[in-house]
């Protein structure tokens, strides 16, 4: 599994004081909590006493209390109280569990999993829109290969076909047989843009504009995040509008993926925010269900045969993706060794 990375553990809105969140990210089980002083902590989800899940316990004042025998751990993972041993001097020095580094960024809590000496080299994707725009999110588990998930969600060509009933008309059709992609590859990410035909319905054109082409930007950050960014210019009485879809994905365990889709927007249904959230959540769920249908079928073939000879001109983003992925994947495992 791909470690030495920052992963999105949860959103701030999900974590309330005195509640416990359980997560499994790249094979490691975590418990996330805030104590009564609102101090946040991410610990190994395991009591070192009898190896049960600490997420089955509760927050006790400043500590996390195991639900099995009542051992208490502070936010650094050190056992500070054993009910049957009131003398703190009798707490074994080895009575501690792993504490994970974290950051709060873009209204989300990010956890670093890997070798701490490599932490400065890991990147959190740029999700600046989440600081300013409303957004909705959903999470789905699926059986798939992580590389194919990353490649497929990043692929621009599939929108015309897989999402023809959800975002095809809203974002416009890709030019066939040729689309000119502008792509820049960086050390740990790639970014690009292309023009899509504005083939929206008459109602969508009234709202989003009549321009012949719509600019769509896309990004990918190794190994876990992609972005689709559509911009609609000022039109009639409507201000500039923007729709951004992020996908964040990681292995829970081998061949099982958690995929988090985040949809954020600017000035869309701005006079009715509750309707905007309902509409975007409904649309987001539909998009993910369409993706999963294909992603789960794709995994059965990924070791069968090389498909390099079938990559065509329109697969330029895929070629760029493979170049970035292969380089960083190799470097990641060299660092682990």
Image (spheres, rainbow, N blue to C red):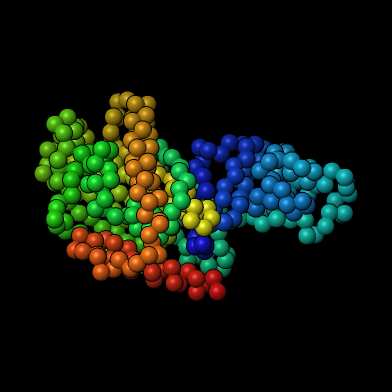
Residue 139: image x %, image y %? Answer: 46, 42
Q: At x 72% / y 48%, what residue is drawn?
A: 52
Answer left or right for 51 relative to 305. right
Residue 147: image x %, image y %? Answer: 40, 60
Residue 58: image x %, image y %? Answer: 70, 38
Q: Quadrant of residue 113?
A: bottom right
Q: Could you tell me which quadrant the C terminus lies in?
A: bottom right
Answer left or right for 64 relative to 300. right
Residue 126 visible in the displayed image: no
Q: At x 73% / y 38%, what residue is drawn?
A: 60
Q: Is residue 272 above or below residue 177?
A: above
- Nearer to me, 119 or 262: 262
Residue 251: image x %, image y %? Answer: 49, 55
Answer left or right for 241 relative to 213. right
Q: At x 28% / y 68%, what residue is drawn?
A: 308
Q: At x 24% / y 65%, what residue is drawn?
A: 310
Residue 200 visible in the displayed image: yes
- Nearer to me, 95 or 300: 300
So how many labels did they put on this image?
Answer: 0
- Nearer to me, 46 or 162: 162
């Amino acid at each position: 599994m791909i470690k030495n990375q920052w992963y999105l553990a949860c959103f701030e809105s999900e974590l309330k004081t005195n509640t416990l969140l359980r997560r499994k990210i790249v094979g490691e089980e975590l418990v996330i909590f805030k104590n009564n002083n609102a101090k946040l902590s991410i610990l190994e989800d395991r009591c070192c006493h009898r190896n049960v899940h600490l997420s089955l316990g509760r927050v006790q004042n400043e500590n996390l209390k195991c639900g099995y025998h009542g051992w208490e751990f502070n936010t650094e993972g050190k056992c500070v109280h054993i009910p049957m041993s009131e003398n703190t001097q009798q707490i074994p020095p080895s009575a501690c569990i792993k504490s994970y580094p974290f950051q709060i960024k873009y209204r989300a809590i990010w956890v670093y999993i890997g070798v701490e000496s490599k932490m400065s080299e890991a990147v959190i994707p740029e999700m600046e829109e989440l600081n300013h725009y409303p957004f909705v999110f959903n999470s789905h588990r699926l059986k798939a290969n992580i590389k194919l998930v990353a490649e497929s969600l990043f692929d621009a060509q599939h929108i015309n076909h897989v999402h023809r009933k959800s975002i095809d008309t809203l974002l416009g059709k890709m030019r066939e047989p040729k689309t000119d992609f502008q792509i820049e590859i960086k050390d740990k990410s790639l970014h690009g843009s292309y023009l899509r035909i504005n083939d929206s319905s008459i109602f969508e054109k009234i709202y989003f504009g009549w321009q012949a082409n719509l600019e769509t930007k896309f990004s990918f950050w190794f190994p876990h995040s992609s972005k689709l960014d559509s911009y609609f210019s000022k039109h009639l009485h409507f201000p500039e509008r923007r729709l951004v879809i992020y996908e964040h994905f990681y292995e829970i365990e081998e061949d099982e993926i958690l995929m988090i889709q985040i949809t954020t927007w600017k000035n869309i249904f701005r006079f009715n925010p509750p309707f905007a959230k309902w509409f975007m959540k409904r649309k987001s769920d539909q998009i993910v269900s369409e993706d999963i249908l294909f992603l789960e079928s794709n995994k059965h073939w990924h070791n069968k045969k090389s498909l390099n000879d079938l990559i065509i001109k329109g697969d330029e983003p895929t070629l760029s993706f493979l170049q970035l992925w292969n380089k960083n994947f190799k470097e990641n495992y060299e660092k682990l060794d």
